[in-house]
Amino acid sequence: MDMDLDTILLETEEAMEKAVDYLKNELRGVRTGRASTALVEYIKVDAYGSMTDLRQLAMITVPEPTQLLIKPFDASILQATIKAIQNAGLGLNPMAEGKQIRLNLPALSGERRQQLIGTVKQMGETSKIAIRNARRDANKHIDKLAKDKTQHIPEDTAASAKDDVQSDTKKYEKQVEEMIDAKAKEIQEI
């Protein structure tokens, strides 16, 4: 499929932005030393025959720095909610209390903090790879345009487009690094 230069640059930037947004969402679910509703908001609960984000099914509050309180709007999904939290791989033990669920977040051990930081760095690497793949694809498309007889673009135009792609790559990689550093700091906080 033939693309013009503007389309190539636009789609490249969109792809890079998507990688950063995806990382942002992934990082929300990574536990830090402090309780945060973001930890459980996106857990999928099997409710009313479909998988739904917990935040749409319950009120989630932080009564204490190491505790979450989850009040399903409908008590009939309490057990499904507990099961979803247990299966989310967060290592949390939900306790039913009447029509609500209490989650006590155990303090993170130093070793667990290091593991989490490792996981976060890995997520960052994955995003950077997606960003670099977008750069590679864009450069391939630009080269194709430069060689194309019908819609040939001048060499300096191609070179300048590649510079744009490279500066986008740097910009989005920097965003990824800042997000990872911030999350690592958060994990280290007691």
Image (tube, rainbow, N blue to C red):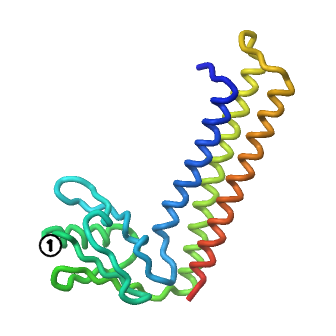
Q: Residue 106 is drawn in which quadrant?
A: bottom left
Q: Is residue 160 left or right of residue 173?
A: right
Q: Quadrant of residue 52?
A: bottom left
Amino acid type, mark 1: Ala
Q: Position of residue 179 (x, y in %)?
A: 62, 65
Which x, y percent locates residue 68? Answer: 35, 82
Q: Which residue is nearer to you in this view: 93 or 76? A: 76
Picture coordinates of residue 32, whole percent (x, y): 51, 78
Residue that sits furthest to the front in the current view: 6
Q: What residue would you read off at disc 1?
A: 75
> Which image quarter is the N terminus in?
top right
Specify whether 32 is left or right of 118: left
Q: Secondary structure at mark 1?
A: helix
Q: Residue at x 32, y 61 (%)?
A: 53
Tell me what residue is drawn at x 72 percent, y 46 percent: 168
Does residue 136 sit above or below 27 in this rendering? above
Q: Is 155 on the left or on the right of 182, as rendered?
A: right
